[in-house]
Image (cartoon, rainbow, N blue to C red):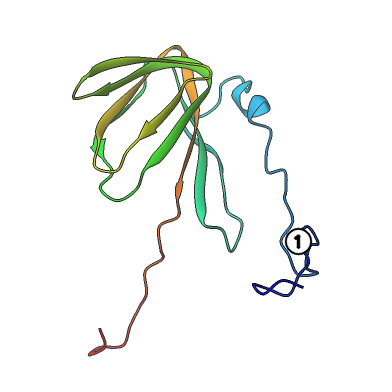
Amino acid sequence: MTAAGGDTPGTPREDAPLPRILCDTAALAALDDAPAGALWRLAESGRQLDANVVHLPPGHHVGTHREPDLDVLHLVIAGSGTLTAPDGTHPLHRGTLTWLPHGSTRSLTAGPEGLTYLTVHRRRPGLRIQSPGRG
């Protein structure tokens, strides 16, 4: 027994969550005529992360924006495009992994094959509705 939780190291608890395969990103990236927007979203309960697979058709873009609170990992899984930031334009191609730190300003533009990418970031806490007079 260990002091932390009573389990022997390496021995799973009966109620321990199990790893799960969520989707095949290669299959999503290979879709012909994929619609613009999210092709997949992480929706499992109890999670600490949010993740999305997003597709931008050729020439489409995500306008300049800034995420004030969350760091985001951005992994290109198909196609190509550009990331534009205050320090210039950066090429994106399959396999490019980019860290978008909170507070950074950026925009994305899909190349001639479109751009399909995975984003991962800490889950935003849900809004809490409180009774009037409670803070």
Q: Quadrant of residue 101?
A: top left
Q: Which residue is mark 1?
A: 9
Q: Residue at x 51, y 44 (%)?
A: 51
Q: Residue furthest left?
A: 86
Q: Is residue 123 above or below residue 75?
A: below
Residue that lies at the very extreme toward the top in this rendered image: 112
Q: Quadrant of residue 2?
A: bottom right
Q: Is residue 36 something that shows in the picture? A: no
Circle 1 Cα neighbour tier, 10 Å, few/some/many (<14 / 14–19 / ≥20): few
User: Could you tell me the amino acid type at mark 1?
Assistant: Pro
In depth, the one of 16 and 20 nearer the eye is 16
- In the rendered image, residue 134, in percent from the top left (x then y), is placed at 26, 88
* Residue in the image at 45% along x and 55% along y: 123
Location of the N terminus by quadrant is bottom right
Q: Taking 6 as reference, is 54 above or below it?
A: above
Residue 13 at x, y = what percent?
Answer: 78, 68
Q: Is residue 37 left or right of residue 135?
A: right
Secondary structure at badge 1 equals loop
Q: Is residue 1 above or below residue 59?
A: below
Q: Is residue 118 above or below residue 110?
A: below
Of 4 and 45, nearer the camera is 4
Quarter of the image with the C terminus is: bottom left
Place of residue 105 in the rendered image (x, y in percent of width and height, measured from the top left)? 23, 34
Name the residue located 62 percent from the left edge and 29 percent from the top edge. 28
Whether residue 34 sits left or right of residue 64 in the image: it is right
From the top left corner, tell me how far across and down residue 74 is, in percent.
44, 32
